Image (spheres, grey):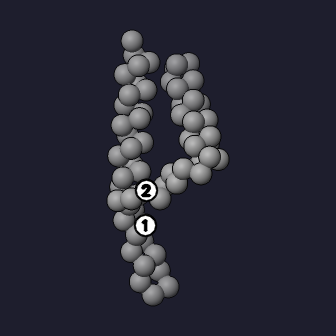
Amino acid sequence: MARLLIGAGLVLVLAGVLMKLGVPLGRLPGDIVIRRGSGTFYFPIVTCVLVSVVLTLIAAILRR
């Protein structure tokens, strides 16, 4: 459990640093945005895939 919390903390810190440096997390090319009238539908599919890959790699490293 401790390793999981440490890994999650490191991911959050890394995401914060990247956002501070201006990397557009959550607004990557390939994310779906539909604007109609006064409503907006946003589905961050590429962001979800990227987060999934990073978390999978971190989990694989922590399992060793």
Is 25 above or below relative to 33? Answer: above
Q: Secondary structure at mark 2?
A: loop
Q: In the image, residue 32 lies at what x, y percent?
A: 36, 65
Q: Which of the two marks, 1 or 2, is nearer to us in this view?
A: 2
The residue lying at 57 percent from left, 24 percent from top is 6
Crowding around mark 1 (Cα neighbors within 10 Å: few <14, some 14 to 19, many 20+) is few
- Considering the image in quadrants, where does the C terminus appear? top left
Callout 2, which amino acid? Leu
Q: In the image, residue 49 lies at what x, y percent?
A: 35, 46
The numbered disc on residue 21 is none
Callout 1, which amino acid? Tyr
Is 25 above or below relative to 8? Answer: below
Q: Which residue does the numbered mark 2 point to in the structure image?
A: 28
Q: In the image, residue 58 lies at what x, y percent?
A: 43, 26
Crowding around mark 2 (Cα neighbors within 10 Å: few <14, some 14 to 19, many 20+) is some
Q: Which residue does the numbered mark 1 point to in the structure image?
A: 42
Q: Earlier in the sequence, mark 1 or mark 2?
A: 2
The residue lying at 43 percent from left, 66 percent from top is 42
33 or 28: nearer the eye?
28
The residue lying at 44 percent from left, 18 percent from top is 62
22 or 36: nearer the eye?
22
Residue 7 appears left or right of 48 = right
The extreme right residue here reads 20
Q: CA distance from mark 1 to mark 2?
A: 12 Å
Residue 12: which quarter of the image? top right
Contact (Cβ within 8 Å) of mark 1 with mark 2: no
Q: Secondary structure at mark 1?
A: strand
